[in-house]
Image: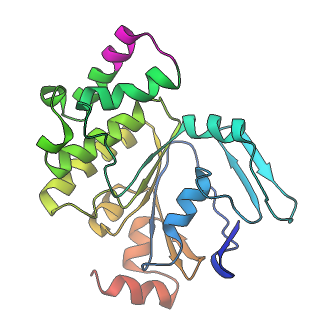
Amino acid sequence: MCKSFDGQAVLDGISLDVASGELVSIIGPSGCGKSTLLRCLNLLEVPDSGELRLVGHGMSRNGGRWRRVDEALAHDLRAQVGMVFQGFNLFPHRTVLDNVMLAPRVVKRGERGLVERDAMRLLEKVGLGSVARRYPATLSGGQQQRAAIARALAMAPRVMLYDEPTSALDPELAEEVLQVMRTLDDEGMTQLVVTHEMRFARAASDRIVFMEAGRIVEIAEPEVMFSNPADPRTRRFLRQFL
């Protein structure tokens, strides 16, 4: 997969396979293409070229340029691939419960009683059952991010993508969010996480991907990546965290 902006390659021939049920952390310096990779997987950005196979959908251009993506296909893919951003992006004028219920009600046209029951179950799952009727502004950052995860889960996705989900949180609040992701991993959810939380990446990941300058430099299991990385660029990057 390749993607450029204004002639500058941001993804320069990325190739990555992720197995069902894996938790894969993507690490690397700022500007190396991590977030763009996630956005291409969810078709929020259209790749310039390459092949994408995700949740039963296959898209390719046989080496040619992607000029557009079928909107019906993109809509169906996004319904099965949840995404959580750095910003919580909750609707401030809606309660936490209403935020979680919105997509199933509008997109899937679910019956209100069933949708509300499922939304409450998800809020309980992420530890927010007691604040379901409150508005986002009354919650801590960690609670808001957990609400954003519950909102993504409300569409029953097969894959979850996270773009620096704890970057705006202090360590205690970040741990609340990371614990939810560990729970989802235990339940078999496929998850790709762009993160600078190296302790989480090491403890929770099945594999870690190190990117630099739009390319994948190295893929390894956590203990190998952190104790004996093969590439000197990986060693230089990790040295600042170890």
On the rendered structure, is 242 left or right of 108? Answer: left
Task: Using the image, determine if residue 174 lies above or below residue 211.
Answer: above
Find out whether residue 44 is within the magenta segment: no
The location of residue 179, given as percent across then percent down, is: 25, 47
Task: Using the image, determine if residue 235 lies above or below residue 143.
Answer: below
Q: Name the quadrant of the C terminus.
A: bottom left
On the rendered structure, is 169 left or right of 228? Answer: left
Q: What range is drawn magenta here?
A: 109-118
Q: Quadrant of residue 74?
A: top right
The location of residue 191, given as percent across then percent down, is: 46, 48
| Residue farthest along the front direction in this orientation | 93
230 or 94: which is nearer to us?
94
Q: Name the quadrant of the N terminus.
A: bottom right
Q: Name the residue located 56 percent from the left edge and 83 percent from the top edge.
A: 213
The location of residue 65, given as percent across then percent down, is: 82, 64
- Residue 18 appears anywhere in the view: no
Task: Using the image, determine if residue 20 lies above or below residue 228.
Answer: above
121 or 70: which is nearer to us?
70
- The colour scheme used here is rainbow
Q: Name the residue located 32 percent from the left edge and 42 percent from the top edge.
A: 148
Magenta residues, dominant SS class: helix
